[in-house]
Amino acid sequence: MLETLRRISKGWIMKIILGLLALTFVVFFGSTDFGGRGGGSNNTDAVVEVDDINYSLRQISREFNLQLQQISRASGRQINLQDPIASSLLTQTINTMVTRSLYDLAARDIGVVASDNAVQNSILDIEYFKKPGGEFNAELFTSYLGKIGMSEEQFFVGAKQDLKRSQFLGSLRESISVPDPMIKSLYKYRNEKRIAEILYINPSKFKGLKLPDETQITKYYEKSKNNFQSPEYRNVTVASLSISKLAADTVIDEQEVIDSYNSNTNDFMTPERRKYKQGIFLDKESAIKAMSLLKQGLSFSDAVNKTSGFPPTITGPVSINQIGEEVLAEKVFSTAINEVNGPIESSLGWHLILVESVIKSKIQPLSSVKEPLKRALSIMKARDNIINILNDVEDSLAAGLTIEEVARENKLTIEKLDPFDAVGLTKDNKNIVFEPIVDLVKTAYSTSEGETSNIIETSNGGFFVIRNDKITPQRIKPLNQIRQSVIDTWIKQEQKKLAIISSKNITNKVSSGKSLKSISLDVGGKYITTQPFDRMGRGEDIEPAIVTSMFKSSTGDVVHIETSQGAAVARLTKINKVNFENASKDAINKLRTQLAEGLNRDLAEQLIAELKSRYSIDVNKDVIEDSLLSK
């Protein structure tokens, strides 16, 4: 199969859209059990049976273990089989396999097929298996199969099943029609905007508060002591290697660049492109009649228009791969300029084509692509080499070497990071300097003190490993150390209470007819008139609480709101209703797509319920759990 893929990889690749619904699976990388489908009740080892598709305990175990490995890598810790998450993951694995089988059965029963050529093209179009230039990387494909323990044939069979499911679920999508009244109502609701005048009351303007006595301070501290605790900190040593660093240290000689250029000239070629006119006819006789009119001296446009009732379409300039109909592509690119070719039959009907212009293909010279090609080659080498380095690091750590020794042997970057908390902030409230910071923090907080983590692969192709050197636990600071901080916090709380009381008084005054703007001059608060804003707050930088209040109000209503900084008084001055007739087509189509996807999910859930009633399902969950969760 690999030889076939290599041959096809330089040709036109079909764009297969497989992510149709929320219930559809992540093709190839989410659907892991491609092979080994049962063929009926002959499988006496079956523990899951969905009509005549069945799975043995070995197959369930294989898919479950793959899911466990993925979760372990994502979380940075090994999931124990007694962990509640393992039981949930096993249930999810079974449900996924059952749902997948239901789709397979339904697709089979209505005769859905997927040609080998379409399956091959869909595999070739997976970005994960492409080189930087876009060509299929057979070596990476083979490496991936080795990692997941799957043969090419199993992968191909599973890809074919995924493609059938995709086509089956695609028919569901095509049946969705969002009613226009729903579109109109939701568009008007979402896009309605409002304008308000707002007075912000700053609590800090309330000066001269009497300081709390010792009893008040102690009482406030005891009540709020959790607010005065320092977070847990972790000190870690991290050893890492990135693709960019490895690529920078990778030497590419001139001959490698020349050889790569010469063996991949298609990647540096701008293909021939053609511009052509096309007449489309319902039957062959109409196309023949148009040809007859051309011979009588009529122009191409007049002959097509007179015969078909429609003017010809103009296409291009396009390359041969951009023409979806293979027979048309062949004719367009074998016809001379200003020559008419036809009648030509395709799945769309009958055609006449007139080639108007040709832009010849050309190859970029080596001099213009030398540096980008050298960088691409260094990255490709780095991607290949990093797998070997990662394996060496893994072996060295398993052999008991320290993280420093491993880093030295494998030329990893090693550093001790400043202590940081669970969101990656150091003691002086700065982010730790590491990329990806989220993965590092997650790993650090799932690794015990003194322990070395699993190797974590990063999204950019690199990896890192950490040792948790020290955990500094949370602690509540004693009152004698933070007395002034407690007093300051108490004062701010009292000031905010006064700001809220003031906002209520101002609300009453404005409701009685006074101007909010004039009151703002008296009280010294910040006064603004907003730009129009929608229900999400877009259009003006105001707090969600104010947005919510204004969309519950009628024009002229005045409300007081507690804000994160203090308090505010807001009056709704105007409601901008939406004129649906002026809505852009793009905005309406976007909304229609969103609603269709929502309806799709609902229909998919109903479909699964219907399929469960149509096909028999038998899951021996006790045997599965006893066998897979009690190791």
Image: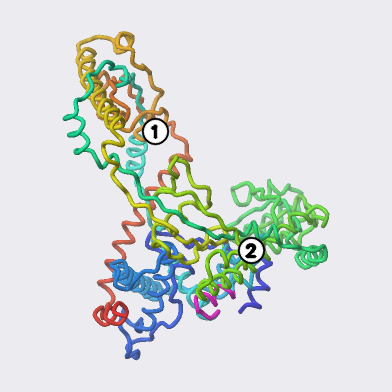
Q: Is residue 537 left or right of residue 320?
A: left
Q: Residue 457, how many percent across, how many down?
A: 52, 63
Q: Is residue 214 left or right of residue 138?
A: left
Label 1, label 2: how far apart the Cα atoms are: 62 Å
Find residue 615 and report its image quarter: bottom left
State the extent of the magenta-drawn residues as a range: 142-152
Residue at (80% x, 52% y) in the render: 368
Q: Quadrant of the N terminus?
A: bottom right
Q: Residue 180, how many percent across, how many down?
A: 36, 43
Residue where numbered disc 1 is placed: 580
Q: Is residue 356 left or right of residue 557?
A: right
Depth check, front residue: 86 or 292:
86
Q: Residue 142, how many percent across, how many down?
A: 59, 75
Residue at (36% x, 56% y) in the render: 600
- Judge depth for marks 1 and 2 and give the one in front: 2
Marks 1 and 2 in Cβ contact (< 8 Å): no
When the figure is inspected, residue 161 is found, relative to residue 361, above or below; the finding is below
When the figure is inspected, residue 34 is found, relative to residue 431, above or below; the finding is below
Secondary element at image label 1: helix
Find residue 332 and report its image quarter: bottom right
Depth check, front residue: 210 or 241:
210
When the figure is inspected, residue 404 is found, relative to residue 471, above or below; the finding is below
- Is residue 432 something one can see in this rendering? yes
Q: Residue 184, how many percent across, how many down?
A: 35, 38
Q: Quadrant of the C terminus?
A: bottom left
Q: Give the residue type that dot 2 points to.
A: Lys
Residue where numbered disc 2 is placed: 411
Q: Is residue 460 magenta?
A: no
Q: Give the residue type that dot 1 points to.
A: Phe
Q: Is residue 274 left or right of residue 107?
A: right
